[in-house]
């Protein structure tokens, strides 16, 4: 008889236990809470074992041992778990492109060479399936960038949570994107007879550079006319968009891959006196001293890629982050993708295996991008006054086996279920 | 007997270039026979388009034109073993513009005004890119300016092919002179030219594997076609087989020419050739220095392209070239020496190299270790043997066609000049050499 009801009792007990354990993690809407007893990794300073983090109204209000929970603030017990700042992917098409091959779901690029007036922020689809997938891995913000022939438009730094793009915006004008013109190489062409001879390719390149320089010159003249309140000056959105770039308020994210073009890009930014961030930069290691001297940060593309030259060593891109950091260049990682944005921490991890100090790797997906994008006062580390963009893990987030237990954006606990997990469950149950 | 004499004399008359003696004697010259030891202070007598005699102390026939051969060397006329000379439409539009690295030789632009319009093919049954029935012998034109240029460079013979499409058509061994195209032909058909060009994703075959499967199917179909055709010789009770010109051409050809440049391509084509059960010749073979043993084992002759891989003239100076490309470029000229050393049967072909530049190209093979006499053999007797015409061409022997080149020194040496060329026993002198390449040479192409 006893045995008979002990089975349901045990079952009941287990359910209760599961519920109780899970309860603190399934957060209520409240954005004030105390994280207790975790190992806190502020990134901006040394790790603090067995520490508490107090969050009030979505912001970090205190870090320390044995913090007292103010009245009414719930306590989340995190014994054995780790608290990290949410990660930042510095280059994606998040929210702009759902399925690359389906045109209707893609709002990434516009025709024409000079489109600085385009704003990625207003095109962001808050309901994108990529968003929950990405944040389930602890990525809480991304920079989403428009694509285009040359001046592609304005990239935005967004939170991966919100009902509308207004909810999501952190820094709507984080950067102006410039795809630096390239000298088209016949090697890139598929059909040999279509290959442009070098002389022609070079002419095309020079013509585009001229076009770009003239545009900057015109924008500058517009700026002067505007400051002088020239009567009858017609408002031009293209030039308007250039004003903060010319003022140095908004950085110019120049995407370039090869050494020569990176050098040309630096020369261009110098000449135009704009603040430059280098994007991609597969051959940035060849230009590291100049990058350091001019204090130009680099948003590196994926580490786990083949080298650009057939004869480069296989680990050319694996070792580059370490090399740049050693030279004193500030780096951050970008996925330059949407669906693989979730792999951002592993790109940094691969660099660690090839010489990048661990602390720098962690910074390159948290505090460094926050500094590069000018939002270090809001994001990037566990510090008092910053937004509570937090991930709670059972270990090192750069390890693939680590599980992200909970994610907060602005102190709001987020649903971690997503399309990947749904499909996983669906096919797990396939008879 | 009488009739035969009549026919022969008629032929003789027909081949004579009008008036003048039909006999020449080159006296007291160095004669590189190729088929045997070189003769010093010897005489070659040509009559009626044939070599009548060669040897020391021959008496010169009365009435023959005599060329004092002191300080002159007589060679068999050179052969371009895979050419488009004589088919003006196949001349390259911009010489030297195409051809990079390890790509197989690019076929010229449409060689044949007769080729059908490209329709979208669904499979091998539509016989895409197949003009196997086309014969170079029917496409010849004396208006091709390259004929004279080639002759001036010492060439008397070419094996010329249509080169457009996968089964481009059948080549012909031709002599590089004549009053009418028909007179030029020595042997036709000489082989089927096969390339691996794809339908550019609009038509079958659009991939390399598609092309290979297609060629394989064509040869299987051809085999079956021949069987049914032979059976139908006794037609009673048999369904009539459909005529298929695409297969007729394949069956007519005594051999098939397959492209292969890289080692892996050579290996693939050697095996493929074996599978086709058809005599095969590989062409291109720049990386054969790495595959000589394999070629030797399969015992398949090869034609070495003289268009050595080079950096594209208009390449981006910032593009770093890969080791693979650089290696092939550096080692390709070693191929003839390696082939010769291991006894592989090989000949040279111009591959759209301008005739006047061929000597320079050969020089690179010589510098890489190819003995000069082997180079001469490759250009003469070996080429003749590969096309099975060594009974009439390729060496200075009694009874062979009087195709000779007379020089004032060793033929592949830089300062050697071609003095005379004999094609079918008719004497030609080289056109004056034009200024060095690059300074207004467009007119000749």
Image: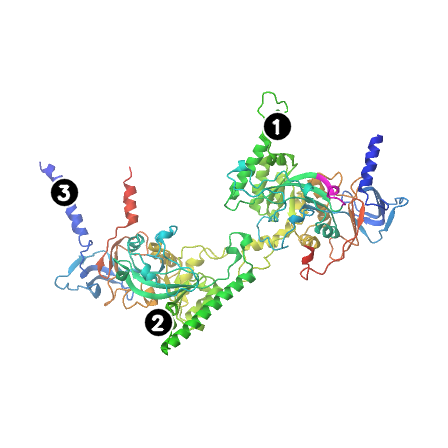
For label 2, the residue is A249
Protein chain holding label 1: B
Residue at left offset 16%, top offset 48%? A17
- Occupied quadrant, residue A164: bottom left
Looking at the rendered structure, the secondary structure element under dot 1 is helix
In the depicted view, which residue is nearer to us: B271 or A357?
A: B271
* Residue farthest along the bottom direction in this orientation: A228
- Residue A271 in view: yes
Image coordinates of residue B68 in percent, x first then y, are 86, 51
Q: Is residue B185 magenta?
A: yes
Looking at the rendered structure, the secondary structure element under dot 3 is helix
- Residue A365 in view: no
Q: Is residue A71 above or below residue B371?
A: below
Disc number lying in front (2 or 1): 1
Disc number lying in front (2 or 3): 2
For label 1, the residue is B229
Query: Where residue A10 is drawn, which disc sits there?
Result: 3
Could you tell me how far apart the alpha carbons at marks 1 and 3 are, in whole angstroms? Answer: 86 Å
For label 3, count other residues whose C-alpha is less than 10 Å away and answer few (under 14), some (14-19) or many (20+).
few
Could you tell me how far apart the alpha carbons at marks 2 and 1 are, in whole angstroms? Answer: 84 Å
In the picture, which quadrant includes the C terminus of chain B?
bottom right
In the picture, which quadrant includes the N terminus of chain B?
top right
Q: Is residue B6 magenta?
A: no
Image coordinates of residue A62 in percent, x first then y, are 20, 66
Please give left or right for residue A41 compared with residue B444 in the image: left
């Amino acid at each position: 008889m006893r045995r008979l009801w002990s089975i349901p009792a045990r079952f009941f007990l287990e359910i209760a236990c599961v519920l109780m354990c899970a309860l603190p993690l399934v957060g209520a809407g409240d954005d004030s809470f105390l994280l207790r007893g975790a190992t806190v990794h502020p990134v901006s300073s040394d790790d603090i074992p067995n520490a508490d983090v107090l969050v009030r109204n979505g912001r970090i209000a205190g870090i320390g041992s044995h913090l007292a929970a103010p009245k009414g603030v719930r306590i989340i017990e995190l014994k054995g778990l780790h608290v990290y700042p949410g990660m930042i992917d510095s280059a994606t098409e998040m929210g702009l492109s759902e399925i690359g091959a389906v045109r209707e779901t893609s709002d990434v690029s516009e025709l024409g060479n000079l489109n600085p007036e385009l704003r990625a922020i207003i095109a962001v689809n808050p309901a994108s399936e990529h968003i929950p997938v990405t944040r389930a891995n602890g990525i809480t913000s991304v920079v989403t960038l428009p694509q285009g022939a040359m001046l592609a438009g304005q990239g935005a730094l967004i939170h991966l949570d919100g009902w509308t793009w207004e909810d999501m915006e952190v820094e709507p004008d984080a950067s102006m994107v410039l795809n630096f013109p390239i000298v088209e190489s016949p090697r890139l062409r598929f059909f040999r007879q279509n290959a442009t001879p070098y002389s022609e390719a070079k002419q095309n390149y020079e013509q585009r550079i001229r076009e770009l320089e003239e545009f900057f010159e015109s924008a500058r003249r517009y700026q002067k006319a505007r400051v002088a309140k020239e009567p009858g000056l017609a408002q031009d959105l293209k030039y308007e968009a250039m004003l903060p770039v010319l003022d140095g308020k908004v950085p110019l994210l120049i995407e370039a891959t090869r050494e020569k073009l990176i050098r040309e890009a630096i020369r261009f930014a110098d000449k135009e006196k704009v603040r430059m961030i280098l994007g991609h930069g597969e051959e940035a290691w060849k230009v590291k001293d100049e990058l350091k001297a001019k204090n130009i940060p680099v948003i590196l593309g994926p580490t786990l890629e083949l080298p650009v030259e057939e004869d480069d060593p296989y680990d050319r891109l694996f070792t580059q982050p370490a090399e740049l950091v050693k030279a004193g260049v500030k780096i951050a990682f970008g996925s330059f993708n949407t669906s693989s944005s979730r792999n951002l921490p592993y790109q940094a991890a691969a660099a660690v295996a090839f010489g990048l100090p661990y602390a720098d790797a962690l910074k390159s997906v948290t505090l460094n991008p926050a500094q590069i994008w000018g939002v270090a006062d809001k994001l990037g580390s566990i510090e008092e006054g910053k937004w509570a963009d937090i991930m709670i893990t059972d270990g090192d987030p750069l390890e693939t086996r680590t599980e992200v237990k909970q994610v907060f954006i602005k102190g709001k606990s987020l649903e971690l279920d997503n399309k990947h997990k749904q499909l996983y469950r669906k096919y797990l149950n396939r008879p | 007997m009488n009739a035969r004499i009549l026919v022969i004399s008629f032929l003789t008359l027909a081949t004579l270039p009008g008036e003048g003696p039909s006999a020449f004697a080159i006296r007291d010259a160095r004669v590189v026979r190729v088929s045997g030891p070189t003769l010093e202070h010897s005489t070659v007598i040509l009559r009626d388009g044939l070599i009548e005699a060669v040897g020391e102390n021959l008496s010169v026939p009365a009435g023959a034109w005599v060329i004092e051969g002191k300080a002159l060397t007589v060679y068999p006329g050179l052969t371009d073993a895979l050419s488009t000379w004589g088919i003006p439409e196949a001349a390259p539009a911009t010489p030297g513009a195409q051809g990079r690295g390890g790509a197989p030789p690019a076929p010229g632009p449409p060689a044949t005004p007769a080729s059908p319009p490209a329709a979208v093919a669904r499979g091998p049954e539509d016989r895409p890119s197949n003009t196997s029935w086309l014969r170079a012998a029917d496409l010849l034109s004396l208006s091709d300016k390259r004929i004279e240029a080639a002759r001036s460079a010492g060439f008397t013979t070419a094996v010329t092919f249509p080169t457009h499409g996968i089964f481009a058509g059948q080549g012909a061994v031709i002599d590089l002179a004549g009053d009418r195209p028909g007179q030029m032909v020595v042997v036709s058909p000489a082989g089927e030219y096969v390339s691996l060009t794809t339908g550019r994703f609009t038509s079958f075959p659009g991939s390399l594997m598609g092309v290979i499967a297609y060629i394989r199917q064509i040869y299987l179909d051809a085999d079956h076609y021949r069987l049914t055709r032979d059976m139908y010789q006794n037609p009673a009770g048999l369904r009539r087989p459909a005529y298929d010109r695409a297969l007729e051409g394949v069956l007519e050809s005594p051999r098939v020419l397959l492209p292969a440049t890289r080692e892996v391509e050579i290996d693939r084509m050697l095996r493929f050739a074996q599978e086709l059960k058809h005599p095969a010749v590989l062409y291109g073979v720049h990386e054969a220095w790495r595959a000589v043993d394999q070629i030797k084992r399969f015992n398949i002759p090869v034609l070495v392209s003289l268009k050595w891989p080079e950096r594209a003239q208009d390449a981006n100076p910032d593009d770093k070239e890969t080791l693979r490309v650089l290696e092939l470029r550096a080692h390709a000229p070693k191929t003839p020496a390696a082939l010769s050393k291991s006894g592989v049967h090989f000949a040279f072909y111009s591959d759209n190299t301008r005739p006047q530049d061929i000597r320079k190209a050969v020089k690179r093979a010589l510098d890489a270790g190819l003995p000069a006499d082997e180079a001469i053999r490759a250009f003469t007797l070996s080429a003749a043997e590969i096309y099975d015409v060594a009974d009439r061409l390729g060496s200075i022997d009694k009874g062979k066609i009087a195709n000779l080149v007379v020089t004032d020194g060793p033929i592949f040496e830089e300062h050697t000049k071609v003095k005379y060329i004999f094609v079918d026993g008719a004497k030609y002198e080289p056109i004056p050499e034009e200024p060095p390449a690059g300074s207004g040479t467009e007119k000749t192409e």
